[in-house]
Image (cartoon, rainbow, N blue to C red):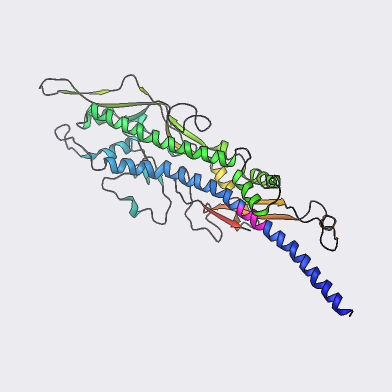
Amino acid sequence: MLIFPTLFLFVYLIYETAKLSREKIRHQFAMDAAAFIEMANYSDFLNRSAYVNGAFPMRIFEEGYASFPANCEGKVANCQQKSYASILFDNGAFPHLGGQYIDGHTPETTISGSPWSIEYGYNSDGSPTSVGPQSDRTGMNNNPPQSVEPFTLFSLNDANHFWHSYELATEIYKLWVQVYSLLGSVEDAQYQVLTRLTAGSPAHSFLQKSYWLNTGDSPSDAQALAGAFDSQLGPFNSSVHSLCQQTLVYCGNQHLGGTGLQPYRPECTSPVVQLQTSGGCEAPLGSGSGLFQVVYLPQSMINNLSAQHGAGLYPGLSLSMNWNYPAQNYFNVNWTQQFGGGGPQLHTTISLAGNSNTGPYADGVQPGVWPDPTPRFQVRQFP
């Protein structure tokens, strides 16, 4: 008779302890899910921005002009025909894999298992490929990127070397503007989505709603998790910027009329063309004017998303918060007094993996936005 009640109380005590453990596990799962969902917003933005910076303009101009030759027969001695894609790349109109463009080159054979080193042009000896100093856009490969004003889409040397008409130069200029206007609008839309999801009211709305839906606690309880995320991440949204081109010139051969030996004369735009403001160039992304070119953010901010944690093996943001545990159990044990201090905490580590060459999850291929825009940002979590 004495053993049975004692055993029953012991079993019930285990049950009460299990209820507390169950609540802890439920809240921990809710925190893990909320942090993962929130970091996915940043992963999506960075991967899509990498595509806008590198792969999209590279493929558009390569496929559009790789089979479009510029003729120079009878124009110069020892004529070496080039495609318009090659001319545009040499002048800095768009980036390409490895900073080099060769007619007939297939980049798919070189990018497998390696970073997409898409950048503005260099020769094999490391010198710029551009035909004139005003066309040298290799400074665009820096972080932050640096452009030149005005940018020369087609140089006077191009007009002297090829049978390249002024009207054709105008058509290609219009397409170049349309492509980068579209890319700028895409980037602006992506940034607006990121801002509304992470910096709106409430801040980190997906994170807070996810935690609330999985716990049923007061919606204000998730504010502590949002605050921890902000303090670990830093000012990410205000670190994102875009570079916009303000002015441009291009040259081509104007037909003078008649049938003389020289019916064409090389001419350039005068005055320089003032480029209209496109999406992605208005505040807060850009300076408020010009044509979108690339979006970038400091490498230190990307590193912060993958900051070394603990022994240095697992990168990530280390998040902690208190959770809403039961005040007491069936035996009237006051948990607040038992825990003391600020009470028990939840903890998780969340990261955008792949930005380190060390550790058990490194594969040597670093994701990037600019330069080397490689869209391989992946969310990894260490609960």
Q: Nearer the viewer, residue 313 or 221?
A: 221
The tally of labels here is: 0
The outermost residue toward the left is: 259
Q: Nearer the viewer, residue 47 or 354?
A: 47
Q: Is residue 47 one of those drawn in magenta?
A: no
- Left or right: residue 255 compared with residue 113: left
The quadrant of the image that shows the C terminus is bottom right
Q: Nearer the viewer, residue 177 or 189?
A: 189
- x, y percentage for residue 348? 65, 55
Q: Is residue 31 one of those drawn in magenta?
A: yes
- x, y percentage for residue 34? 61, 51
Q: Quadrant of residue 57?
A: top left
Considering the whole magenta stretch, tell me its main secondary structure: helix
Q: Quadrant of residue 4?
A: bottom right
| Residue beneath the point at 42% across and 45% down | 51
> Can residue 228 be seen here?
yes
Magenta part of the chain: 28-33
- x, y percentage for residue 283? 52, 29
- Left or right: residue 102 compared with residue 351: left
- x, y percentage for residue 31? 65, 53
Q: Quadrant of residue 21?
A: bottom right
- In the rendered image, the vertical position of residue 68 relative to residue 257, given as above or below: below
- In the rendered image, the vertical position of residue 79 relative to residue 3, given as above or below: above
Q: Nearer the viewer, residue 64 or 10?
A: 10
| Residue beneath the point at 78% across and 56% down | 326
- Left or right: residue 10 compared with residue 176: right
> Can residue 125 be seen here?
no
The outermost residue toward the front is: 1
The quadrant of the image that shows the N terminus is bottom right
